[in-house]
Image: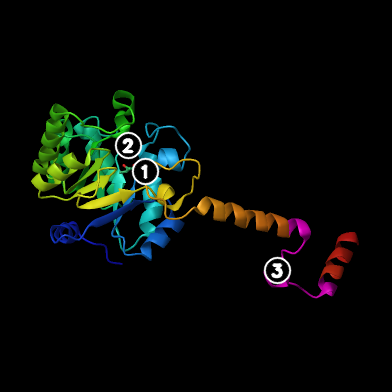
């Protein structure tokens, strides 16, 4: 098992190799990612929506993230695994330390991710001082959905200045990378140009140092909704439903299971068993 180090990822980004990150929430999917060249996996609190069916990420708990991270870490053995600190789990520095330690020590992640800029920078600094790598997250920050709605952020000059300050504060505090979600391309480019650490975009254009996408979005596990920031590479929900209908038809017609799917014993064995039961 060899996972990329943060230093290796930073050096790849510095050499112009774009970083690819995909979300993952379970062992089977992690095993598939493990067969690819993708170096970064995010156990995102988006699991509250795509895996648990919620309408936001706010109900996701630290226990949920620990549980899913454990499964992902077992399957994704060649990736650096980043786990999200969920809503309110880093409201105080003490909470952040306790919960981030759980994601690393119990979950097995190699980094945590948290949302926010200047206001969380002191917490980021403390985590990093204690040996916990931190990825930042700016722009559309889903844990603030009730304040900011679901829309492109920082479209005015003052808001863009604030986001630039947030990014610089995270970098100064020791964050090793920053996710930029739903910000205008030009702002993502300006942030990326001013930082020494990599930016990883989602709905932020092509000028970031990398891109993160949600597993269910790119693979088409929900065919009723494709976010604008996603490119859907497959429609697996259709393939899976088709396969399940084939299974149902085979079971109903009796063509499955077949001889190779089960074992047999000499009928005398069963005859003796029935006789013993009836004796
Ligand atoms: O939780 C998540 O999946 C995320 C990505 C969208 C960046 O934070």
Tell me which label, 1 or 3, sits earlier in the chain: 1
Residue position marked by numbered label 2 in the rendering = 86
Quarter of the image where ligand 1 sits: top left
Q: Is residue 105 visible?
A: no
Q: CA distance from mark 1 to mark 2?
A: 8 Å
**How dense is the environment of label 2, judged by Cα within 10 Å: few (below 14), some, or many (20 and up)?**
many
Q: CA distance from mark 1 to mark 3?
A: 38 Å
Q: CA distance from mark 3 to mark 2?
A: 46 Å
The secondary element bearing badge 1 is classed as helix
User: Badges 1 and 2: C-beta atoms under 8 Å apart?
Assistant: yes
- Residue 40 place in picture, x, y as percent: 29, 56
Residue position marked by numbered label 3 in the rendering = 262
- Residue furthest toward the bottom? 266
The magenta region covers 251-269
Tell me which label, 3 or 2, sits earlier in the chain: 2
- Residue 210 place in picture, x, y as percent: 23, 52
Q: Is residue 62 magenta?
A: no
The secondary element bearing badge 2 is classed as loop
User: Badges 1 and 3: C-beta atoms under 8 Å apart?
Assistant: no
**How dense is the environment of label 3, judged by Cα within 10 Å: few (below 14), some, or many (20 and up)?**
few
- Residue 180's quadrant in the figure? top left
Q: Is residue 217 above or below residue 249?
A: above
Residue position marked by numbered label 1 in the rendering = 65
Q: Which sits in the foreground, 271 or 279?
A: 271
* Quadrant where the C terminus is found in the figure: bottom right
Q: Left or right? Give the position of 98 relative to 244.
A: left
């Amino acid at each position: 098992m060899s996972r990329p180090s943060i230093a290796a990822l930073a050096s790849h980004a510095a050499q112009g190799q774009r970083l690819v990150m995909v979300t993952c929430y379970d062992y089977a999917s992690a095993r598939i990612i493990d067969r690819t060249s993708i170096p970064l996996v995010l156990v995102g609190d988006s699991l509250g929506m795509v895996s648990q069916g919620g309408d936001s990420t706010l109900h996701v708990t630290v226990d949920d993230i620990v549980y899913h991270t454990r499964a992902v870490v077992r399957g994704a053995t060649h990736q650096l695994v980043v786990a999200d600190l969920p809503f309110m789990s880093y409201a105080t520095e003490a909470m952040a330390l306790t919960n981030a330690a759980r994601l690393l020590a119990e979950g097995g992640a190699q980094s945590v991710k948290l949302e926010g800029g200047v206001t969380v920078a002191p917490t980021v600094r403390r985590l990093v001082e204690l040996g916990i790598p931190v990825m930042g997250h700016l722009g559309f920050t889903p844990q603030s959905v009730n304040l900011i709605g679901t829309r492109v952020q920082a479209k005015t000059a003052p808001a863009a200045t604030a986001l630039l300050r947030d990014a610089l504060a995270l970098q100064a505090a020791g964050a090793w990378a920053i996710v930029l979600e739903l910000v205008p391309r030009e702002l993502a480019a300006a942030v990326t140009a001013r930082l020494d650490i990599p930016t990883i975009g989602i709905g932020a254009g092509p000028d970031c140092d990398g891109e993160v996408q949600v597993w269910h979005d790119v693979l088409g596990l929900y065919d009723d909704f494709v976010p604008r920031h996603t490119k859907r590479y497959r429609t697996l929900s259709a393939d899976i439903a088709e396969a399940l209908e084939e299974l149902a038809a085979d079971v109903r017609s009796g063509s499955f299971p077949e001889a190779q799917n089960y074992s047999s014993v000499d009928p005398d064995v069963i005859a003796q068993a029935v006789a013993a039961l009836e004796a």
